[in-house]
Amino acid sequence: MSALLELSQVGVAIGKVALLDRISLSVDRRQILGLVGESGSGKSLTAMAALGLLPLIGGRVTEGCVRFDGQDMAAMTDGQRRALRGRRIGFVTQNPMTALDPVQRIGEQVDVVSRLHLGLSRSAASARTLDLLTQLRIPEAAAVADAFPHQLSGGMKQRIVIAMALAGEPDLIIADEPTTALDVTVQAQIIQILGRLVRDRGLALLLITHDMGVVAQVCDRVAVLYAGRLAEEGPVGPIFAAPAHPYTAALIGCIPQEGMARGSLRGIPGAVPSALAFPPGCRFHPRCPRATDLCRATVPPLLARGEGRAACHHPGHGAGAVP
Amino acid sequence: MTALALPAPMRALRHPAGGLAGGWLVAVIAAAVLAPVLSPWAYDVQALKDAYQPPSALHWLGTDEFGRDLLTRLVYGARTSLSVSGIAILLSVLCGMVLGAAAAWFGGWFDRAVTTVVDLTWSFPEILIALILVAIIGPGTTGTMIAIAVAYLAQFTRLTRAQIMTLKGETFIEAARSLGAGNAHILLRHLLPNALAPVLVSAMLATGDAIILEATLGFFGLGAQPPVPSWGGMMSAGSALVFKAPWIILFPGLVVAVTVVAINLYGDALIAELDIRGRMRAAA
């Protein structure tokens, strides 16, 4: 039995520029996979590939395949892929401020999803919308459904976007940095809501984020992307206890801890390389404290490590976040 | 919150200038609609012995060279001038939105073709395009209407196209698509409604220009044909009599000027009102 969403050895390119290099991931029902990486590491591109929306930005899958519920997305017609979006795969966009149409009432925007995908009548759809909003703990759901997006706060809008993603009764939700644009307190609420949905409804959730703190809080597994390649993947517990890849360790080192000394919060020196000039060998080597000539020359293979996988010539062994 | 409950066109009336301008426009439109009820005179019955009468209690604005009541003709002229320019702009907006949206949506050679033709017509003054078209179609209200519609087509096409181009990249379009929305839904339910507000405001302001253009064509004798009165036609008749009976050209000219200024003032108030929402949206 294969997982609900399965990417195997997926390569993605826009024009002649290869952006994702043989990414393999899977998410199953009742599971949250955190997809982590800095900006430009290919997280959103992975989501677009899973939704079959790459053509919109001029991209295409060059190798490997994306399977949803056992079916190869590449073998589907445009119409079949479109029927999947919203109905079986819900998508929560990055910025709730701009994810809603400013001239349509909230209710209409949520209604239309269940009318399209579940064939509900106008009145049944709006009853369902109210029900969804109430489930997402939105106070005065009827008033909110009647409001325009500019009348709502950011956290409220993100819940509406989540309601829209849920309206088609999907099996999988892909959330692309759902909390990035929100206040910290609201972030926690949204993360809680998403976590509860997975438990209560048996959904699969692909949570794209750059915040390792969020991953530690809710995810079952985590996949770390760096410059279009998978650096490390596996269950959250062991990876946080003993990250094999120095990049994973560095990301974990970026989480503020209680009782930290002033000024001891680490960043990662340097920046993600441009896709036009990926360094040879391990793509992380210019920023890596453990880099050797081997790293500079050859690409580290993705090897099994415990219950997960990591791609590093010099995997860490010790506990903690020290690279 | 309560102020926002009213639609923007009503809120615009609360501005001092907007209210005054709106009042004038409502009065002119009401007078035009109710012309047969309001006026004891007919616009086309000549009474040569009453010609060239200055304003008096009987003829409030005097009479013209055929002894017809000037106020009556002004009010009937409002029917011609307002309906011709209004319908022309409506036609122009509809065609412009369809063309502009199609150009932005399909892109490629179609976009280039539309943009090139539209830019070409935009490089000429509106009056020139309108004159050429009336010369081809022939004078009269229909000809004037089409000529004005085409003269302003470029403006609405470009505006709609630019709006749709910007909106196409918005997150909510991507969000709609990622939830399974099709092309027709995105174009009709998301893109066009969002592009509508700026197009309507610009249409409002263009109506003022269209009234001047209609009056100009009428002045050249290319608009509504006698004895149907139009503001431009009346001014044309009065221009030969400036010294003998100045009121014949004065009053239609004043009405055109005041109406156009009123449309612009009301349009400004409307823009201000719509911007309040824009700012709230940005602040939210």
Image: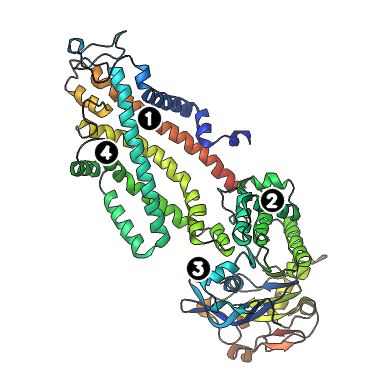
Q: Which of the chains bears the disc numbered 2?
A: A
The disc labelled 1 sits on which kind of residue? Val
- The residue sitting at 61% across, 71% down in the picture is A47
Horizontal side of residue A205 vs B163, given as left or right: right
Q: Categorize mark 1 by other alpha carbons within 10 Å: few (<14), some (14-19), many (20+).
A: some
Q: Amino acid at mark 4?
A: Thr
Please report contact status of discs 1 and 3: CB closer than 8 Å, yes or no. Answer: no
Is the same chain shared between marks 3 and 2?
A: yes
What residue sits 68% from the left and 53% below the top?
A: A129
Task: Identify the secondary structure beneath mark 2.
Answer: helix
- Image coords of residue B280 (percent x, y): 59, 44
Report the coloring of the rendering: rainbow
Q: In x, y percent, where is residue B251?
A: 29, 20
Q: Residues within 10 Å of mark 4 (few under 14, many from 20)?
A: some
Distance from the alpha carbon under mark 1 to that under mark 3: 46 Å
Same chain for mark 2 and mark 4? The answer is no
Quadrant of the rendered structure where residue A98 is?
A: bottom right
Q: Disc 2 versus disc 4: distance between alpha carbons?
A: 50 Å
Q: CA distance from mark 4 to mark 1?
A: 26 Å
In this rendered view, identify the residue nearer to me: A96 or A77: A77
Evaluate if marks 1 and 2 touch, with contact meaning CB atoms under 8 Å apart: no
Q: Position of residue B267 (x, y in %)?
A: 44, 35
Which residue has dot 1 on it? Answer: B261
Q: Amino acid at mark 2?
A: Ala
Q: Chain of mark 3?
A: A
Residue located beneath label 4 in the image: B142
What is the chain identity of the residue bearing mark 1? B
Which mark's residue is nearer the viewer, 4 or 1?
A: 4
Which-is-in-front pick, marks 1 and 2?
Answer: 2
